[in-house]
Amino acid sequence: MLSLTVLGSGSSGNCAVIRTDRTRLLIDAGLSGRQIMLRLEAVGMKLEDLDGVLLTHEHCDHTAGLEILCRKHQVPLFATPLTQEALQQGTFRKASPRWKLMQTGAPFDFQDLRIECFPVPHDAADPVGFVITDEESRLGVLSDVGFVTNLIRDRLRGAHTLFVEANYDGPLLEADTKRPWATKQRISGRHGHLSNEQTAELLQALAHEDLHHVVLGHLSDDCNCPDIALKKMTAVLRSAGAMDTNVVCAKRSVPLPWMEVARRRVMHSLPAAVAPTAPVSATPEVEPFPSEVNVVAEVEDTYRAFSTSVPNAPTAPQRRKQLSHRREEQPDFWLDTGVA
Ligand SMILES: [Zn+2]
Ligand SMILES: [Zn+2]
């Protein structure tokens, strides 16, 4: 079972961890080396436990602790060639990292995980998001993105947990008096960051009944407010039929508790008369990995157990109808002149 925690997230530093029984990976290393080690300890891990670091891009709020990590533990760094080049020029003076180069759009297997990175629009050399899957869970990671492309939406579809940026709230950024106009333009531009409004639109498109957690990251201290972001995202998810999705904001200075990426399957046998027979149209696009699993039947099975435990919950067919109806109404907010 794949699990996620966020050690810290915000404009001052971003660092998350994923783990399975066999694999432990950092996603970005934007805290100081010391803070990464302290916070790993706080979630029950040591630096030496890490099998690698996945890098979204070279900005220092995602890479500040890398050199120290590499000096203390020769952990492989997964980056695209252009991100590696950018980091080689600035970050590494006293360490020789072990690079593992990734190609965008080309999934690769690492131990018990399949990892795919995909391009995102942001003002860095070659920024990427990630989809990480094990045989039962699919995690989507998206941070530092100017606008949501069709490609991003497609890659994140069917994720059981989403760790997504919600950097600023539109009205709060507009009202902010600390930042000059040019900085506000950069933040809200097509190679800047996602607003609450943009993230909410993305979540509306990605909502499904098996979306377990949404973790909001990279919240601005001045131009966002966790309560506003949580309310907005929760409302959008509920209206799109994701009634049971847990929404949390990652914190700057303390790690979140570990979260299992997918809900545990409810193990019970159904009477033959009600066993699911037809494919489910709203089934997440989970790629069976590494062996075939009957995801359709399992999703149906899990939902059936959920709906019987919640008074007045719609039946699985009713919920599918609600979801497909909402998708038809969904306007196309995404312009894809950049990366798609
Ligand atoms: Zn960035
Ligand atoms: Zn950042």
Image (cartoon, rainbow, N blue to C red):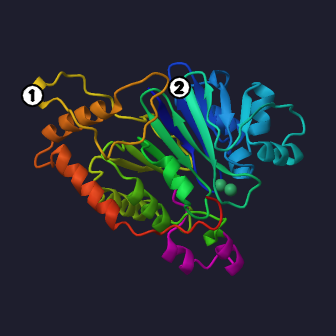
1 vs 2, front mark: 1
The quarter of the picture where the N terminus appears is: top left
Residue 132 appears at what percent x and percent y? 54, 36
Residue picked out by circle 2 = 44
Q: Nearer the viewer, residue 103 or 86?
A: 103
**Residue pictured at 86% horizontal, 43% vertical:** 88
Q: Residue furthest top?
A: 22
Instruction: Name the amino acid, label 2.
Output: Gly
Magenta run includes residue 185: yes
246 relative to 1, above or below? below
Q: Is residue 239 visible?
A: no
Give above or below for 336 relative to 310. Answer: below
* Picture quadrant of ligand 2: bottom right
Left or right, residue 108 beside residue 260: right
Query: Residue 170: horizontal and vertical position, in percent?
Result: 51, 73
Q: Is residue 98 above or below residue 306?
A: above
Q: Which quadrant does the C terminus fall into?
A: bottom right
Q: Position of residue 180 (x, y in %)?
A: 69, 78
Does the beta carbon of the residue at mark 2 sit less than 8 Å from ligand 2?
no
Residue under pointer 1: 273
Q: Is residue 53 visible?
A: yes
Segment colored magenta: 165-186
Q: Is residue 338 left or right of residue 230?
A: right
Residue drawn at the location 42% of the way across and 41% of the way down: 285
Identified at 24% across, 22% down, the residue is 267
Which of the labelled discs sits on residue 288, or is there none?
none
Q: CA distance from mark 1 to mark 2?
A: 46 Å
Q: How many marks?
A: 2
Which amino acid is tagged 1? Ala
Residue count near mark 1 (Cα–Cα under 10 Å), binned few <14, some 14–19, many ≥20: few
Q: Is residue 173 left or right of residue 302?
A: right
Coordinates of residue 198 in the picture (x, y in percent): 49, 65
